Amino acid sequence: MIRISLCDDENHITGTLSDNIKGIRPDIEVYSYDCGENLLDSKYLYNDIVLLDIEMTGINGIETALELRKGGYEGMIIFLTSHKEMVFDSFQVKPYNYFVKPIDIDKVNRILKNAINEVIDRKTTHFEAVSNNHTFRIQIDDIYYFECNGRKIDIHTKNGIITIIGKMNQIEASLQNKQFFRCHKGYLVNFEHVCEFSNNEIILTNNQKVLISRLKINSFKEAFKAFMKGNIRC
């Protein structure tokens, strides 16, 4: 799922953009805000792309973008403006691009499709996690396994453990068709780091041991065999 937020105090613009964006791909969620304050009060860290009007009443778009960055948002920011020269004031927040009003829908489609493709590419090589109001982009190959601890998920990585609030089912779904396997209700393991296994546990390349369910052992063997066929391993 790709999450895009629109922030503009002109409702007809957010309405037009929202309808257009939803038509690009079926897996896009669009959220609209009429001022920077409302956007900053939202769960903005989960956005992949934010479209921001620069000239808004109250806190303007550049000030909003600065607060997004200060709050840990590392996603794409695209500015909307009626005055092209104002874009130069926005470079400190590293915007992805900008649209000049009146909006050219063909340009919107072209730029957003490129941005969305970059988001998809990033999602296939990284796992994005939000912890303590900070967004972490973790290389897929750096993850050993996910461990469920109640409402919390511990992500065991080469650089330590990152704890997030989440559900294992959602993480498993987001990593579908990649090198992960749900070997137990409490564990999601990365095939890339499987060193050896028995009928009740998996030993990883960092020597950690992960439980494997008796009901999962056969499907694990089949999936791991298929993974091995597609990878040359040392």
Image: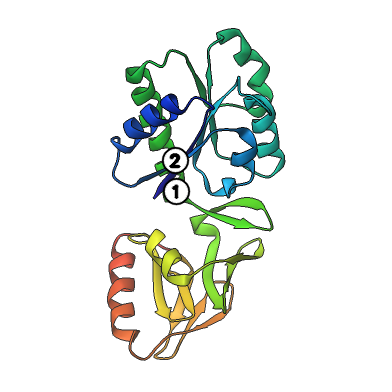
Residue 197 circle label: none
Q: Position of residue 115 (x, y in %)?
A: 43, 32
Element type where label 2 sits in the image: helix
Q: Does residue 109 appear anywhere in the picture?
A: yes
Is 133 drawn above or below residue 40 in the view shown?
Answer: below
Applied colour scheme: rainbow
Mark 1 highlights which residue? Answer: 123
Give the crowd class for mark 2: few <14, some 14-19, many >=20 residues within 10 Å: some
Considering only vertical position in the picture, is 208 above or below 171?
below
Identify the residue position indicated by label 2 in the image: 119
Left or right: 92 with respect to 28? right
In the image, what residue type sits under mark 2?
Answer: Val
Front one among 156 and 119: 119
Please identify the quadrant where the C terminus is shown: bottom left
Q: Amino acid at mark 1?
A: Lys
Horizontal side of 111 relative to 46 (left or right) equals left
Asked if the residues shown at circle 1 and circle 2 are in contact, with their CB atoms under 8 angstroms apart, the answer is yes
Residue 63 placement, left or right of 4: right
Q: Position of residue 117 (x, y in %)?
A: 38, 36
Determine whether 132 is above or below 82 in the image. Answer: below
Q: Residue 206, relative to residue 56: is it above or below?
A: below
User: Is there any visible trace of residue 175 in the rendered image?
Assistant: no
> Where, by quadrant of the figure, is residue 92 drawn?
top right
Marker count (numbered): 2
Q: Residue at x 36, y 91 (%)?
A: 214
- Residue at position x 40%, y 88% in the image: 213
In depth, the one of 69 and 141 nearer the eye is 69
Q: Position of residue 212 (x, y in %)?
A: 43, 85
Q: Residue at x 52, y 70 (%)?
A: 145
- Marks 1 and 2, Cα distance to the nearest angstrom? 6 Å
Q: Residue at x 29, y 84 (%)?
A: 218
What SS does tag 1 mark? helix
